[in-house]
Amino acid sequence: MQNLQKQFILALLAYAGQREADLEQVCKQSGLNHKALLTDTQTAISNQQVEQLWKNLSHQCHDPLFGLHFGESMQLAALGVVGQVILTSSTVGEALTNAGTLIGLLTDLFSLQLEHGPQQFTLHLIADPKKQESIPFTYRHLAEYLMVFTVHELDGLLLQRIRPVSVQMPYAISEPSKYARVFRCPVQPRQPGFSLAFSNTYLNQPIISANYALQNHLLQQINGLVKEAKEEGPLQTRIFNYLLTNSYLYAMSLEAVAANFNVSPRTLQRKLKEEGVSFLQIVDEVRQKLAVHYLTSGNYQIKEVSYILGYNEQSAFIRAFKRWTGKTPTDFLNQADSKATQARS
């Protein structure tokens, strides 16, 4: 457990570092050696140290919903378990089952149970009642992290954005609108336990966008779109190339990109502003390049391109495409086909 747990702790600290927390101070307050965490693979971490870490990070970042926000920002790849889940799974249901077994490698506080029903399937996060009482900060923050992480990482298994049917938690929540935004549906408080319910339509769908073969295929296809740039070149060009070459993770957040460039989100935004561009403008340019590329390749339908690029609704993608090109995707393809026909004749 220690190896995966340590990876998780390092990811937790990296996220806090993005939010400009004093990591050395937090570790010291939590009874952890910051340098040893980075260099010593055998460093043991107790439940009480993890408990203090959650508490101190939440306090220093002035964020009582720290676990919720951490789950929203973190990607499965950060834990190094993508291969273990994907290589042993062919459907979403199998991936969830296999991912549930990995929770035991991360923590002994929770286990995951999958319940099948006629219309929906439900994931129950089961807490050890004795440990729950002794480490209350870990109980709440880690539970919210695991639940949000599950919802957002399901996006990476399919070419669509997942919405739960219902989300339940066993305690009162102070900011319902934030929970609803993160989970994409209202959260029901004061319920018997933690649960996430999803439509059965997801369960047997084959894993697509988190599949290594598709990732490699996408990467090979977009190599020609990468802009020439030196390591010390404009930040906007380096971010453009980073987003492009990680396009299979279509929901790349500002926080995730900032972490890759070892700066805080605020610093990244400031540096881009100095170059006369915003992060959203770069994301928009990447989406435009990829949209045209995928459509003209003839390998993807409009609906698939919409999902690959992270649009919740196909109509939103169509509006964006018309803004970029002055045409709808259908009109664009019809015009391209017409030109190809004329060229052949």
Image: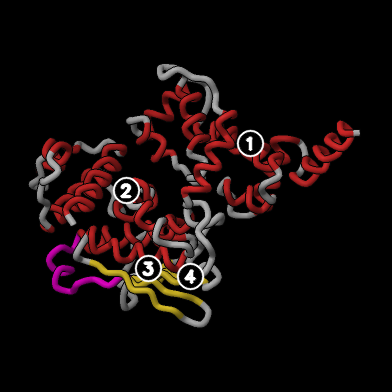
Q: In the image shown, does 325 or 96 lie closer to the viewer?
A: 96
Q: Magenta region: which residues?
A: 125-137
Q: Position of residue 248 (x, y in %)?
A: 51, 44
Circle 2 — which element?
loop
Horizontal relation, residue 128 to residue 153: left or right: left
Question: Farthest residue toward the right?
Answer: 345
| Mark 3 burial class by Cα count in 10 Å: few <14, some 14-19, many 20+ | some
Write the residue at 53% across / 25% down.
277
| Mark 1 burial class by Cα count in 10 Å: few <14, some 14-19, many 20+ | some
**Pointer 3 residue:** 97
Which comes before the other along the chain, label 1 or label 4?
4
Mark 2 and mark 1 in contact (Cβ < 8 Å)?
Answer: no
The quadrant the N terminus occupies is bottom left
| Mark 2 or mark 4, whichever is nearer to me | 2
Mark 4 and mark 2 in contact (Cβ < 8 Å)?
Answer: no
Q: Is residue 304 magenta?
A: no
| Mark 1 or mark 2, whichever is nearer to me | 2
**Pointer 4 residue:** 198
**Pointer 1 residue:** 288
The Cα atoms of the two marked residues, 3 and 1, are separated by 36 Å
